[in-house]
Image: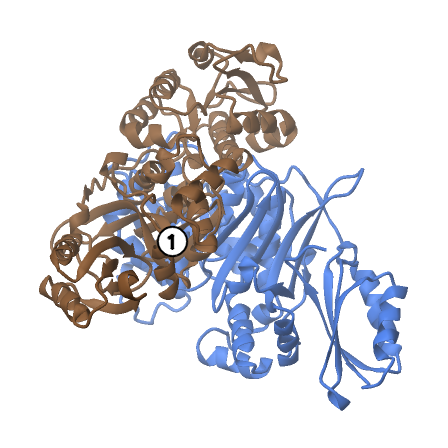
Chain colours: A brown, B blue
Amino acid sequence: MTGAQFGADQPVGVAVLGYGNVGSEVVRILQEQVDDLQQRVGAPLALRGIAVRDASRDRGLDPDLVTTDARALVERDDVDIVVELIGGIELPRELVLAALSSGKSVVTANKALLSEHTGELAEAAEARNVDLYFEAAVAGAIPVIRPLTQSLAGDRVHRVAGIVNGTTNFILSAMSETGADYGETLAEAGNRGYAEADPTADVEGFDAAAKAAILASIAFHSRVSASDVHREGISAITPQDFESAHALGCTIKLLSICERVPSPGGRDRISARVYPALVPDSHPLATVGGAFNAVVVEAENAGRLMFYGQGAGGAPTASAVMGDVVMAARNKVNGGRGPRESKYANLEIAPIGDIPTRYFVNMQVADKAGVLSAVAAEFAQHGVSISTVRQEGEGTGARLVVVTHTASDSALSATVSALEQLEFVTAVTSVLRLEGTHR
Amino acid sequence: MTGAQFGADQPVGVAVLGYGNVGSEVVRILQEQVDDLQQRVGAPLALRGIAVRDASRDRGLDPDLVTTDARALVERDDVDIVVELIGGIELPRELVLAALSSGKSVVTANKALLSEHTGELAEAAEARNVDLYFEAAVAGAIPVIRPLTQSLAGDRVHRVAGIVNGTTNFILSAMSETGADYGETLAEAGNRGYAEADPTADVEGFDAAAKAAILASIAFHSRVSASDVHREGISAITPQDFESAHALGCTIKLLSICERVPSPGGRDRISARVYPALVPDSHPLATVGGAFNAVVVEAENAGRLMFYGQGAGGAPTASAVMGDVVMAARNKVNGGRGPRESKYANLEIAPIGDIPTRYFVNMQVADKAGVLSAVAAEFAQHGVSISTVRQEGEGTGARLVVVTHTASDSALSATVSALEQLEFVTAVTSVLRLEGTHR
């Protein structure tokens, strides 16, 4: 804590676990920016080792730095900061806990780990009074964690809404532009390196949900895990949805939304949810294209803030990791530590059924007089107020596109079930939410 | 440093100097958010006093809190953090130095003070190992200082370009929309509370230059003061400039630009400059309208990041101030301190004449054959390559609008002097830079 052991001659030791896209960039920066890093930390950063799975591959690294024994590397006495970039959950969990419990600060980009085990990790950091930093876990290079935990520490956050998954944003942006269908576009994303061989974690919203859990935890000073997040993926989105969205002046984005839900007379609750939603073209998130990420924060005094940049990729993510490494190293040298976990508010999660949003309902209908009034009557009967209705196509291609005012998930579900019973309605082809508008 | 004197029962004392737009919001938050602030700090924040110029005015405050003796308030033993929101330079300088040298951390929103006296203040903070925070000094509620000093601490910043003055952005946005002239729009801005009675600091770019100095200092780890910043205001911008800009697919914005200027074979230099410039409509800064602020940061690994939000106003600025207060208070409780001044790189300022940019030159010309070739010859003779030429109007209203490729300020100035000698050229009515494009 006093920093007596560090100084101009006494370096801060860094271990890097994992040498993939991000790990290799972190090592490159550590090796190239020696002087700048030393000046910024107040002591040299010394790379003590790199843990890899297969040491036999030639990576052009000094062989003395490379090890397959991550555990031994983490526990070396001359390692002060452990950078975890392995991916997965169980192995990194063990290594991070080992590092924290032996008094080392940890920097990780592992959102899955954090969103599952944040409590355990935070307590281990607390017990040894060390830093656990994870700026790179959400939105890559974009500073989001630090602004939320530090810059907005004197404000009250109402809402965080972001595009935090580059793969799905690439796919949706491409579908919006080309009119191609989901399967085709996913294949194209894979060919161009924007989608993994198994894209499930991205396209079904697991990655975005893990990030939503992290954002909700820090924005609302509560523990939120990935399983608390309502999650819908993008695989059911059709070219017709985009056509209808465009006709309404909207596009479709996969959003991670964390909201403070006021309870009149009671304690606020938290809504954390991930789903594809219509967003008006005029909304700042609508223009975030391709693999970019953006996060919009709404706070009581700050108003609306937006953060935009590259949400993935080796170098951008390494930039966020290295910012954390420098801050953790400064704390090793100067004493003190960064913000710890803040969970005092301990707000409950509101179920998705309690969260009113606007809806977009796309249905195939018979091309007959009376359809509109029959459909409108079902909405009215369930207390769901209609904002606009459009009739599209004709004959067997006839469709009705309804946009509602704010309604609860449960009222909308009941409406959709009733619509599906109507003789006139061939199928309700999609139900999406509309975000970023009022009422 | 050990934090032994703080804890659940031992509050962190806060003094607020100034009770204007921002000061009153800071006091409101301190009084309304007692529980949240205590949880976030780890000890209660106690408001010890508010220094005002005239204590006789009724502000609805507990009279025991109000004092006209700012100096005595600053030096009270039970004050740990001083929040300086007075404005001006000399008085705040004395008070901030008194606070720092008696071991109190300081939070200030005073860009003029910082851009003139940053060295002296930083040294006083260093001598007593206390925090000097100033997130609110640049771009109000938008976290910019903390991302630059912390999140990007492991990266190399190439460029920071921002719209950081709300008054001029309001005026330019309105001129762009309405076609009204500068004087009229300034008067309107005054009526609506967006311009001061004496608008000089805003419209002549002094405020933007102070902020550019602060941004350049922290982005490039060097001391940059306001007088190092090349500065041009917006008062000469005409409706014709906007007309021509729109015809080119551009708008006009007052930009604060801080750039790393590579010197092949030598040390990098810094360019810091404020001027109105044409910005392509497709550039992220082009859509920042009204009193909003935005800052774009380009870094080697992070790539391009953008931060957007409310750059002024009592509550948004107070949000940034309170974030700093909470961080400074945490450090008082836990020991440690935030990032200190970093000036190790000590880069020199490059004179504006050395900075190549693209230019937009608007001239009144005789409506005759041969004008274009005579004008083009002058550009060629001075080594300034033309990108596009547009002829606008006719007869006595005939104009030529030239957009150049990248040229040095000195080559362009020589060209303009030569153009003014040409018989065909009645007047060079404006010379503006074009930013946000390549070549």
At label 1, the amino acid type is Pro
> Up-down: is B314 above or below A214?
below
Q: Chain of mark 1?
A: A
Q: Position of residue B8 (x, y in %)?
A: 25, 37
Residue B385 in which image quadrant: bottom right
Q: Quadrant of residue A37?
A: top right
Label 1 residue SS = helix
Residue at position x 49%, y 78% from top?
B190
- Does A402 sit left or right of A72 as displayed? left
For label 1, the crowd category at 10 Å Cα-Cα, with few meaning under 14, some 14 to 19 and many 20 or more, is: some
**Is B244 on the left-hand or right-hand side of B54?**
right
- Position of A191 relative to B121 (above/below): above
Vertical placement of residue B392 versus A65, above or below: below
Question: Where residue A196 appears, x then y in whole percent?
Answer: 44, 32
Quadrant of the rendered image containing residue A222: top left
Q: Is residue A155 visible?
A: no
Identify the residue under disc 1.
Answer: A239
Q: Nearer the viewer, residue B393 or A402?
A: A402
